Amino acid sequence: MLGRMAEPPKPRWWAMRRAQNLKPATYRCPLCGRHLPALSEHMLLFPEGDRGRRRHAHTECVLAARKAGRLPTREEWLKTQPRPPSLWQRLIERIARHEPE
């Protein structure tokens, strides 16, 4: 019996750049599902910077998704992450663990 393939984890952040190709190919925009001719100016999306999983998308779709907050950059994602304890905080915790009771 064939099972369903597991969905890859949702990317936490995206790298993006402008693109235009001279190759006569057609892609499907992952954001709207419509066709995208490679000859037109468009955007390349890299989930978590992985160039092997790049996706071609309409520039308008990328701009709309960015405005809606659905395509955060690495810098934007990092700002939402908890900060690791500072050296001073780690030192205090270590001393507290080793104090006699």
Image (tube, rainbow, N blue to C red):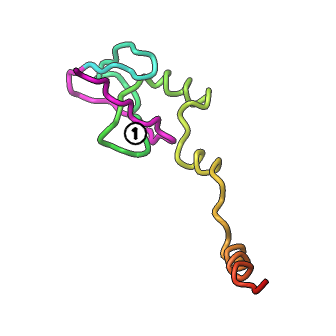
Which residue is drawn at the image coordinates 60% and 45% (left, top)?
76
Quarter the C terminus occupies: bottom right
| Nearest the eye: 47 or 39 | 47
How far across and how far down the image is residue 53, in percent? 33, 37
Quarter the N terminus occupies: top left
Which residue is drawn at the image coordinates 34% and 14% (left, top)?
35
Q: Relative to 5, does residue 48 appear above or below in the rendering?
A: below
Left or right? Give the position of 85 relative to 28: right
How far across and how far down the image is residue 91, in percent? 69, 79
Which residue is drawn at the image coordinates 63% and 51% (left, top)?
81
| Nearest the eye: 70 or 36 | 70
Q: Residue furthest right?
A: 101
Which region of the structure is painted magenta?
1-25
| Nearest the eye: 100 or 30 | 100
Dot 1 corresponds to which residue?
46
Q: Residue furthest top?
A: 34
How far across and how far down the image is residue 89, in percent? 72, 73
Q: Residue furthest bottom?
A: 100
Left or right? Give the position of 21 relative to 82: left
Which residue is drawn at the image coordinates 30% and 21% (left, top)?
27
Badge 1 amino acid = Phe
Name the chief secondary structure element in magenta.
loop
How far across and how far down the image is residue 48, in percent? 44, 44
Task: Answer whether residue 16 is magenta in the image.
Answer: yes
The quadrant in which residue 4 appears is top left
Task: Answer whether residue 56 is magenta in the image.
Answer: no
Circle 1 — which element? strand
